[in-house]
Image (cartoon, rainbow, N blue to C red):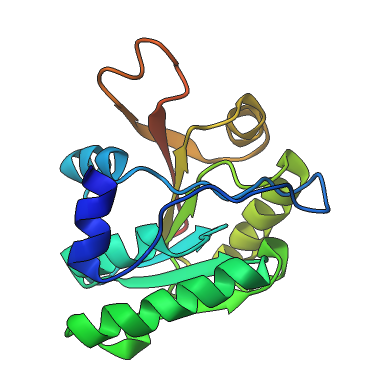
Amino acid sequence: MRDHYYDKLLNIKTGGIQQGFNKSFHYHRYEPTPFSALEILIDQYEIKSSDRIVDFGCGKGRLNFFINYLYDATVVGVEMNEVLYDEAMNNRTNYLKKSKTNTDKIEFHCCYAQEYEIKPEDNRFYFFNPFSIQVFNTIVNNILVSLETTSREVELLLYYPSEDYIYFLENQTFFELKKEVILPGLYEHNSNERFLIYSLSFV
């Protein structure tokens, strides 16, 4: 019900689950974060208009439009699947017809996640378990390299976090767990129904 409400409000179409599987076992099929979960996240996590959020495995762009609509933050979607990327771009066109946001604040890239060039302004990175730990490791390392060039605070937002992601961050990086946001009514039956926010500051 919430998904239909927000899709209509934002003039987008982001429902459905990707049929079939990607050719590479490193990439998981598309499934959007429920709007109901995003509502809980933003109630407990601060986002500013100055933030630049990168969603790896963005699919049709649900998170991007939701965050931009509420906070006017810059949002970047990275999607390797050309069909999903095209749908995200169509959603962007329809969203901009209704929204007054600056077109520069919503961008999508059709490429493998590890090939996305981390920008100095990128400071929030979102992952809904989109790919294997090997790909995740590469992306985190790309973020760390960017911090050596441009010092800043960055945060990783993990929804439905895998144990592999958690182990890597807590044992092989300097990222520290900043916050856990559980989804009431769901977490009690499935401990993966939560967000974990990891923070690292090079200032």
User: How many labels sit on residues?
Assistant: 0
**Residue that appears at 38% across and 59% down:** 62
The answer to whether residue 158 is above or below residue 72 is above
The answer to whether residue 127 is above or below residue 64 is above
* Location of residue 151 in the rendering, given as x and y in whole percent from the top left corner: 47, 67
Left or right of 7 on screen, residue 53: right
Question: Looking at the image, can residue 193 be seen?
Answer: yes
Left or right of 124 on screen, residue 149: right
Question: Quadrant of the rendered structure where residue 49 is?
Answer: bottom left
Quadrant into which the N terminus falls: top left
Question: Quadrant of the rendered structure where residue 41 is?
Answer: top left
Judging depth in this view, the residue of 121 and 6 nearest the camera is: 6
Question: Looking at the image, can residue 149 be seen?
Answer: no
* Location of residue 134 in the rendering, given as x and y in whole percent from the top left corner: 77, 44
**Residue that appears at 22% across and 56% down:** 6
Judging depth in this view, the residue of 175 and 191 nearest the camera is: 191
**Residue that appears at 30% across and 26% down:** 183
Identify the residue at the far top of this view: 188
Identify the residue at the far right of this view: 24
* Location of residue 30 in the rendering, given as x and y in whole percent from the top left corner: 58, 50
Quadrant into which the C terminus falls: bottom left
**Residue that appears at 45% across and 49% down:** 32
The answer to whether residue 160 is above or below residue 3 is above
* Location of residue 152 in the rendering, given as x and y in whole percent from the top left corner: 42, 64
